[in-house]
Image: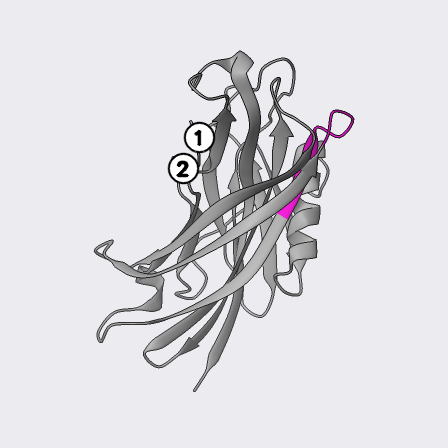
């Protein structure tokens, strides 16, 4: 018997200020429960600017368009208020890796110099839908975010490689996926938004539960100038 579970989780980065330098923001992730309905939720907290809030938006399914709208609403501060919850009926967790929810690209040899930032990518939203069968789980996962043009950035298309990993309860690797997101930025449009939705299927070990598994999405930091 095949069970379909729709749920979503959001990784929130907080507010980002774009001036002559870009300020880094720490992130937390909130998980939302649901059955038969997806929820896109965000919470702003633990930010260097202080303050906290939560936004919850009900959607019929996880789509790139909805995630993109959620990412833009996160930046503009719009969206209805709500509260996050826990794991949805054993659906595997989907989180933004704490240390890889953002990546800043610098000029060669100037990593860490705020005046040498070319651009910065941030993952601000995540969502998942679970399709659970005996011994196997398919997760339709999605994420969205933004790219900010830095003091040394140039106009044009930008591409960021992304890694997605699945681990079991012992945090041993089970499956992985790679993809890339692209945006266009310019001096008169210094913020670009991206979203992506894909699926990954993996086997559940005998005696294990789907909810014990965890998916993580992270920027690939092997690209030149990443800091």
Q: Residue furthest front?
A: 108
- Residues drawn in magenta: 186-194
Q: Where does the image place residue 209, in percent across and percent down from the top left?
A: 30, 68
Give yes or no for contact between labels 1 and 2 (Cβ–Cβ under 8 Å): yes
**Does the magenta segment cover residue 145?**
no
Percent from the top left, x then y, of residue 207?
A: 22, 73
- Image quadrant of residue 223? top left
48 sits left or right of 63 in the view: left
Which image quarter holds the C terminus? Answer: top left
The residue wearing badge 1 is 226
Observer-nearest of 47 and 71: 71
**Secondary structure under the numbered disc 2 in the rendered image:** loop
For residue 191: magenta? yes
For image coordinates 55% across by 12% down, the residue present is 115
Residue at 35% in and 63% down: 211
How many residues crowd mark 1 within 10 Å: few (<14), some (14–19), many (20+)? some
Q: Which mark is residue 221?
A: 2
Q: Is residue 81 visible?
A: no
Q: Is residue 190 visible?
A: yes
Judge by depth and name the residue closer to the eye, 42 or 166: 166
SS state under label 1: loop
- Is 73 placed left or right of 127 in the picture? right
Cα separation between marks 1 and 2: 6 Å
Reply above or below: 168 against 137.
Answer: above
User: How far from the left and from the top, in percent, is residue 166?
Assistant: 35, 58
């Amino acid at each position: 018997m095949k069970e379909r579970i729709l749920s979503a989780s959001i990784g929130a980065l907080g507010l980002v200020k774009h001036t002559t330098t870009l300020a880094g923001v720490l992130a937390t992730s909130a998980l939302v429960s649901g059955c038969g309905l997806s929820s896109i939720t965000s919470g702003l907290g633990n930010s260097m600017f202080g303050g906290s809030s939560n936004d919850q938006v009900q959607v019929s399914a996880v789509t790139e368009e909805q995630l993109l709208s959620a990412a833009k609403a996160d930046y503009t501060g719009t969206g209805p208020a709500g509260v996050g919850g826990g794991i949805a009926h054993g659906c595997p967790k989907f989180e933004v890796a704490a240390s890889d929810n953002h990546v800043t690209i610098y000029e060669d040899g100037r990593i860490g110099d705020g005046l040498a930032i070319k651009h910065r990518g941030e993952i601000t939203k995540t969502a998942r839908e679970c399709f659970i069968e005996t011994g196997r789980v398919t997760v339709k996962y999605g994420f969205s975010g933004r790219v900010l043009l830095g003091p040394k950035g140039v106009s044009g298309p930008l591409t960021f490689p992304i890694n997605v990993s699945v681990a079991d309860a012992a945090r041993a690797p089970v499956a992985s996926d790679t993809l890339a997101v692209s945006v266009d930025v310019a001096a008169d449009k210094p913020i670009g938004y991206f979203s992506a939705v894909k699926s990954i299927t993996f086997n559940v070990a005998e005696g294990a539960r789907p909810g014990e598994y965890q998916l993580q999405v992270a920027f690939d930091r092997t690209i030149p100038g990443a800091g």
